[in-house]
């Protein structure tokens, strides 16, 4: 028999893996497209903030529930 909360942990792990894959792809694509332009540092900051929200803050909030 599975321990209580196992499904939640599996769901959080799946969410985290998916979020990391998506954000790495977004940041890499932006880096390739904006390489050498003046907008690159600004977009990197914006995307980095989004990545921190979805990869660090949201999973932490969900685990604390």
Image (cartoon, rainbow, N blue to C red):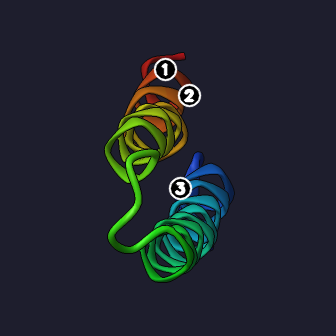
Q: Position of residue 61 (x, y in %)?
A: 49, 20
Q: Which mark is residue 62?
A: 2
- The answer to which of 28 and 42 lies nearer the viewer is 42
Q: Which numbered disc flags the more N-terminal residue, 3 or 1?
A: 3
> Answer yes or no: do the residues labelled 1 and 2 have beta carbons within 8 Å?
yes
Question: To which quarter of the image does residue 21 belong?
Answer: bottom right
Q: Position of residue 33 (x, y in %)?
A: 56, 77
Query: Is label 1 in a helix, a strand or a loop?
Result: helix
Q: Position of residue 23 (x, y in %)?
A: 54, 63
Give the residue at x 55% y 40%. 54
- The answer to which of 26 and 10 lies nearer the viewer is 26
> Answer yes or no: do the residues labelled 3 and 2 have beta carbons within 8 Å?
no
Of marks 3 and 2, the one in the foreground:
2
Left or right: where does residue 51 sit relative to residue 8?
left
Left or right: where does residue 41 sit relative to residue 1?
left
Query: Is label 2 in a helix, a strand or a loop?
Result: helix
Of marks 3 and 1, the one in the foreground:
1
Q: Which residue is mark 3?
A: 9
Quadrant in which the N terminus is drawn: bottom right
Give the residue at x 58% y 47%. 5
- The answer to which of 46 and 56 lies nearer the viewer is 46
Q: Which numbered disc flags the more N-terminal residue, 3 or 2?
A: 3
Q: Position of residue 63 (x, y in %)?
A: 46, 31
**On screen, 13 above or below 9?**
below
- The answer to which of 29 and 56 lies nearer the viewer is 29
Q: Which mark is residue 61?
A: 1
- Label 1 vs label 2: CA separation? 4 Å
Quadrant in which the C terminus is drawn: top right
Question: To which quarter of the image does residue 28 belong?
Answer: bottom left
């Amino acid at each position: 028999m599975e321990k209580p909360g196992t499904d939640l942990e599996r769901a959080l792990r799946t969410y985290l893996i998916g979020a990391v894959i998506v954000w790495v792809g977004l940041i890499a694509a932006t880096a390739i497209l904006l390489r050498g332009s003046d907008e690159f540092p600004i977009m990197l900051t914006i995307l980095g903030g989004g990545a921190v929200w979805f990869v660090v803050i949201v999973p932490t909030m969900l685990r604390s529930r």
